[in-house]
Amino acid sequence: MFQANRPPPSPLSASDTSVLKNDPENPSKLGFHERLRHFTWAWYTLTMSTGGLALLIGSQPNKFHGLQEIGLAVYAFNLLLFALVCSLMATRFLIHGGLLASLMHDREGFFFPTFWLSIATIISGLHNFFGSDPSESYLIALEVLFWIYCACTITVAVVQYSYVFTSISYRLQTMMPSWILPAFPIMLSGTIASVIAIDQPPRSAIPIIVAGVTFQGLGFSISCMMYAHYIGRLMESGFPNREHRPGLFICVGPPSFTALALIGMAKGLPADFKVLPGETANDGRILELLAITAGAFLWALSLWFFCIGAVAVIREPPTAFHLNWWAMVFPNTGFTLATIKLADAFGSSGVKGFASAMSICIICMFLFVFVSHVRAVWRQEIMYPGKDEDVSE
């Protein structure tokens, strides 16, 4: 897939080499020890999607008794999955080594940011499900988590893109939306800020919102620059290979999460917030109206990207499971959450009903991808030589 001046690929083990000589239709059985060599950073797409689903369930406009408990159960399940994935990743590197090689890999490296996206859903879910009556110490801890997250993700965005710019060459004809991923975690700083700022005292809320707007703008701006290459690639070379088409839904995420963050942060401003001097100006209300307008504008862009991705996948559905299938869940979760925010802002029961219908579709897609994921592991369609994101294309 890529043409690059890149570090040499990791050498295959003896067992990998013998396996690749076999009939691909009848793969040899590998032990867990060898399969763990191919447990990649892309597995965090599972936890970021599960965490996003928990947030979506907890944010439904049309609630019923027990809904919050269902969302909490999904959140707890995601914590277990996250702990499991982290344990397996650590075991992989302890047994087989290659941590730096995985981060520098021309394909697998782009999925390292999904670890931070999982962290973002965990922080947001923490406040959604446990922040109903927050204590002062809890709010301080949440504030500290926010600033640590911002520091780590801005470092990821700078260091990873700097490495790509200086050490790897990609042909623009092969551009994929995964190139956006290093900017995605810092962009979700705004989403976290929109969740936690509303309960913070003014001394903390204002800096958190300022940082959220700033970093949300940074991530979305980088995404827009990548969109130019993405559209040019589609115009010149058409849709990518059918196996990579689920990844097109990544483009749905930046505008939808930006709409979600802007509206949430505007609502989180203190009641006496002022930008301009004067006793009559209601600056917070003005900014909220501007955020809603911008949110509706960005929602339409997300809709367009969603339709492009849907057309591409429907025309030629992928034939084998890959972890990029989770792109059909997480970005569309942000799209649905943005729809819910707009429905609340406009007070429209029709839009709320539409958002509920979108949520049902997301839940169905999550279950479909999750079952496909489990089956693929069982049938050795992933975590197997030549079938994962640790192979250059």
Image: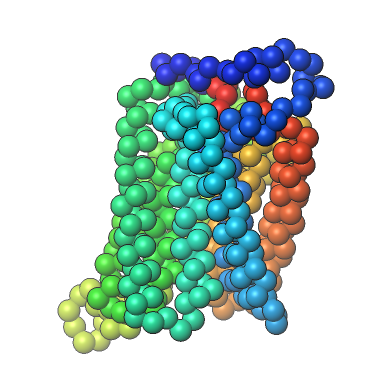
User: Which residue is pictured at 41% across the width and 44% down the height?
Assistant: 183
Which residue is nearer to you in this view: 188 or 174? 188
The reply to whether residue 296 is in sight is no
Q: Is residue 66 above or below residue 321?
A: below
Which residue is nearer to you in this view: 366 or 210? 366
Q: Is residue 229 above or below residue 47?
A: above
User: Which residue is pictured at 72% across the width and 12% down the height?
Assistant: 21
Q: Determine which quarter of the picture holds residue 161.
A: top left
Give the quarter of the figure containing the N terminus.
top right
User: Which residue is pictured at 34% across the width and 49% down the height?
Assistant: 152
For the view shown, which residue lies furthest in the left direction?
A: 277
Give the quarter of the figure containing the C terminus.
top right
Q: Is residue 265 above or below residue 17?
A: below
Q: Position of residue 141 (x, y in %)?
A: 35, 70
User: Which residue is pictured at 63% across the width and 39% down the height?
Assistant: 323
Which residue is nearer to you in this view: 140 or 202? 140
Q: How many marks?
A: 0
Q: Position of residue 73 (x, y in %)?
A: 65, 68
The reply to whether residue 284 is in sight is yes
Which residue is nearer to you in this view: 358 or 106? 106
Q: Is residue 213 left or right of residue 3?
A: left
Q: Is residue 28 left or right of residue 267?
A: right
For the view shown, which residue lies furthest in the bottom direction?
A: 279
Q: Position of residue 86 (x, y in %)?
A: 53, 47
Q: Determine which quarter of the picture holds residue 142.
A: bottom left
Q: Position of residue 283 (x, y in %)?
A: 29, 77
Q: Is residue 344 left or right of residue 8?
A: right
